[in-house]
Amino acid sequence: MSTHPATVSIEPQRDLKIPRHIGVIMDGNGRWAKQRGLGRSEGHRAGVEAVRRIVALAIDYGVQCLTLFSFSAENWRRPPDEVRFIFGLLRRFVTSDLEKLHAQNVRIRIIGDREGLERGLRGIIEDVENRTAGNTGLDLIIAFNYGAKTEIVTATRAIARKVAAGELKAEEIDEATIARHLDTSGLPDPDLILRTSGEMRLSNFLLWQSAYAELVFVEENWPDFDESVFVRALKSYTERDRRFGGIRT
């Protein structure tokens, strides 16, 4: 299987509304593998190829931010061998794809709890963020060891410490205050949340940020994600009437 990013030669459809920020719950690697009589590791390998495809599509279609839910805080419950394999895939993806992503002006950001990660992996994360920090193209956000409830708790504690220290008054706390203390600080909220494999839930992904996101669920497992699925999701998004609690005048 190729270890290089997939190249996509496409002519984007101009009648589509393109979300500024797309969040993706990449689900179904295991089911994809099981359907083919393969081990779960093969499903995860195929899932990496799908990551390369959606990054290329996001660039070509002019998406500003792409957040991929790659490993949740709850995924630690999986068998240790599978967890180690997923961590290894992250390392290999970064080391094999970094130069091309950097050349494509992609800025990479990793969100989630880093305390539970071993030192070498934390070093890789810091290196890729530092090397791409000045890029101005696609913001590629990888949610790794991430859970939205933990993110909100951590933000709340940070705000509480500022109040206790007299740096902030309780009555000054508003939505913007909380947003600044989340892992996604400085990024626009997602316009579209896409989930593969037919499951219809957020699974603790960007709960605060997705308050007004459009949700699209597709039947395809993540390794089968391609441009046709991407365009179908964009068409669904284009047809939505986003009023943010108001009414059309």
Image: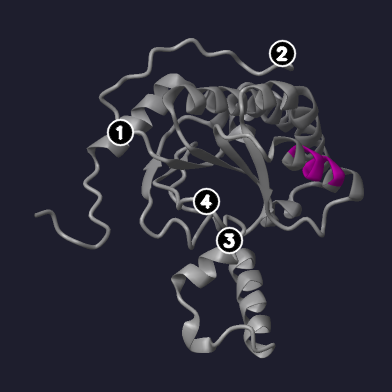
Q: Nearer the viewer, residue 169 or 221?
A: 169
Residue on which disc 1 sits: 17
| Structural distance between the alpha carbons of marks 1 and 2 | 32 Å
Q: Position of residue 166 (x, y in %)?
A: 65, 89
Q: Quadrant of residue 219?
A: top left
Marks 3/4 in contact by CB < 8 Å: the verdict is no
Q: Amino acid at mark 4?
A: Leu
Callout 2 secondary element: loop
Taking the spot 90% from the left edge, 50% from the top edge, the residue there is 119
Q: Position of residue 135 (x, y in %)?
A: 63, 34
| Structural distance between the alpha carbons of marks 1 and 3 | 27 Å
Q: Nearer the viewer, residue 167 or 146?
A: 167
Marks 1/2 in contact by CB < 8 Å: the verdict is no
Residue on which disc 2 sits: 2
Taking the spot 49% from the left edge, 10% from the top edge, the residue there is 9
| Structural distance between the alpha carbons of marks 3 and 2 | 33 Å
Foreground mark, 3 or 4? Answer: 4
Q: Amino acid at mark 1?
A: Lys
Residue on which disc 4 sits: 187
Question: Which residue ends up furthest to the top in the rendered image?
Answer: 9
| Structural distance between the alpha carbons of marks 4 and 2 | 32 Å
Residue on which disc 3 sits: 148
Category of crowding for the residue at label 1, using alpha-carbon neighbours closer than 10 angstroms: few (below 14), some (14–19), many (at least 20): some
Q: Which residues are magenta?
A: 123-128
